[in-house]
């Protein structure tokens, strides 16, 4: 008997018809995915073969810790792992400032889908003080505008996953990263570095479901569906920023639909006409106050996100080189990161010599790449971070930042360690700078250039 089931996804008004024939659901475009009462999803044809020693196999464990966001992917995983691996599931949801999530509703959803136990952990303070403070001191920037929100978030999530796996006697951890992205590298390298005995399940690598198939599977297994095929963007969010990929963003020849993509920041045509100025206080490279009022780093980041987003600050469209060799495009919203790093970098330049600033720039670039490239526990990064910490011992002072129409501009700054000497730098008459020595300096300074030019001159033609 053929039963027609009308599936309506409330968000964006998506409307699809799925046909259920006793034990199977017919997805759009004719692909077949099994209903919960029929054969399990591990019977579906897949080309994936497990070759790494850290990959888990069915019937070798009884309990799995699932990194659970409550979205379509991880909700489908919760059911799929139970069917495929025949094990208990404990879900772990970590709060690192993802404002869109209702954590209570996520726990309830996990329990409804069969989770043996649900764990929700507030890690915002730890994330800010242990990781984002380093990002600020290192002027975190990968390839011209990515403040590393996702790579930094993956470090703390992995650390907590290992902690809770041990506490709950789980020998396997499952994550929702794809087989083409960076996050699979980050999760698996960090987890197996911290505890080599742990095994990994990466369902998205294993199954052959696309977006439509996942929605069909969710409907067939009574998983609440709010995603739509008309909203093609994939997002990752924490307090340090939001990354958006998918849809027209994937095509460099197309202009991203900013009004549809942005979650935090106002599009420029919706930003205020008047600028806002804020004064950020730093101590040893870390923000400690706004407008003279001491705040926790978490509070400062939240405040800067709110004010910066209002003015459209920190929106970047970037071509990014992934670890696996792919070149992708993303849209990033980093209001607090943009404000704080811009302010920090200017203050750092004020209190450092030219040689210090040059070397610090090289160190920052290497630090950013290593964090992006899942190398947080590489000894070299420890040494680089030690240099950065030492360099920031004198990065103390106040920076005034003006926010307007997508820009964060430093308009004034002060520091007790400033190397700016007004008596030397002023264009007014001054006896502090001995101009009589200038000509002799010029003669010695240009000696190597003159010698080389006299020996050989490059012909542009």
Image (tube, rainbow, N blue to C red):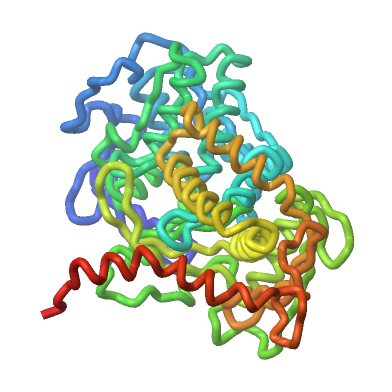
Name the outermost residue toward the bottom: 273
Residue 434 image position (x, y, % from top left): 68, 74
Res. 187 in view: yes
Rendering quarter of residue 302: bottom right
Q: Residue at x 39, y 66 (%)?
A: 447
Q: Is residue 327 above or below residue 307?
A: above
Toward the left, the furthest residue is: 461
Quick one: which residue is furthest to the right in this view?
293
Q: Is residue 327 left or right of residue 165?
A: left
Picture coordinates of residue 448 (x, y %)?
35, 63
Q: Nearer the viewer, residue 432 or 89?
A: 432
When the figure is inspected, residue 242 is found, relative to residue 21, above or below; the finding is below
> Considering depth in this image, is 440 or 150 the residue closer to the camera?
440
Compared with 333, 202 (above or below) is: above
* Res 266 visible: no
Residue at (28, 48) in percent of width and height: 210
Identify the residue at image location x=46%, y=28%.
378
Question: Which residue is more in the foreground, 388 or 156?
Answer: 388
The quarter of the rendered structure image containing the N terminus is top left
Marks counted in the figure total: 0
Left or right, 73 with respect to 18, comes to right
Question: Quarter holding the C terminus?
Answer: bottom left
Residue 58, given in percent of the width and then of the height, sits at: 33, 15
Q: Who's the residue at 63% across and 49% down the image? A: 137
77 up-or-down from 286: above or below: above
State the image coordinates of residue 64 (x, y, percent, origin top left): 48, 20
């Amino acid at each position: 008997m053929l039963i027609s089931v009308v599936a309506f996804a409330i968000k964006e008004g998506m409307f699809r018809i799925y046909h259920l024939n006793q034990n199977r659901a017919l997805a759009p475009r004719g692909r077949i995915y099994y209903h919960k009462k029929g054969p399990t999803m591990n019977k579906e044809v897949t080309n994936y073969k497990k070759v790494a020693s850290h990959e888990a196999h069915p019937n070798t464990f009884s309990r799995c810790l699932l990194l659970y966001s409550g979205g379509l992917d991880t909700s489908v995983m919760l059911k799929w792992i139970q069917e495929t691996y025949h094990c208990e599931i404990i879900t772990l949801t970590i709060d690192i400032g993802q404002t869109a999530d209702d954590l209570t509703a996520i726990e309830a959803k996990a329990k409804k889908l069969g989770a043996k136990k649900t764990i929700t952990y507030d890690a915002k303070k730890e994330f800010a003080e242990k990781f984002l403070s380093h990002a600020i001191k290192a002027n975190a920037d990968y390839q011209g505008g990515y403040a590393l929100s996702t790579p930094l978030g993956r470090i703390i999530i992995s650390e907590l996953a290992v902690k809770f796996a041990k506490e709950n006697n789980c020998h396997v951890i499952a994550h929702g990263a794809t087989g083409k992205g960076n996050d699979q590298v980050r999760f698996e390298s960090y987890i197996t570095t911290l505890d080599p005995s742990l095994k990994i399940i990466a369902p998205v690598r294993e199954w052959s479901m696309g977006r439509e198939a996942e929605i069909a599977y969710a409907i067939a297994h009574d998983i609440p569906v709010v995603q739509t095929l008309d909203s093609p963007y994939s997002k990752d969010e924490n307090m340090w920023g939001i990354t958006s990929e998918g849809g027209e963003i994937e095509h460099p020849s197309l202009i991203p639909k900013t009004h549809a993509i942005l979650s935090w920041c106002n599009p420029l045509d919706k930003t205020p006409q008047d600028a806002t100025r804020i004064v950020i206080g730093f101590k040893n490279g870390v923000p400690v106050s706004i407008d003279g009022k001491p705040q926790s780093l978490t509070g400062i980041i939240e405040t800067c996100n709110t004010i910066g987003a209002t003015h459209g600050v920190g929106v970047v469209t970037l071509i990014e080189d992934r670890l696996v060799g792919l070149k992708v495009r993303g849209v990033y919203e980093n209001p607090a990161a943009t404000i704080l790093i811009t302010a920090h970098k200017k203050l750092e330049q004020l209190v450092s010599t030219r040689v210090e600033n040059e070397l610090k720039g090289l160190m920052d670039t290497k630090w950013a790449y290593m964090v992006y490239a899942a190398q947080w526990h590489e000894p070299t990064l420890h040494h680089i971070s030690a240099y950065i910490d030492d360099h920031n011992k004198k990065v103390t002072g106040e920076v005034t930042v003006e926010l307007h129409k997508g820009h964060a501009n430093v308009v004034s700054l002060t520091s007790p360690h400033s190397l700016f000497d007004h008596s030397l730098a002023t264009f007014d008459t001054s006896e502090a700078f001995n101009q009589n020595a200038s000509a002799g300096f010029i003669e010695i300074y240009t000696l190597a250039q003159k010698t080389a030019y006299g020996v050989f001159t490059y012909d542009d033609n």
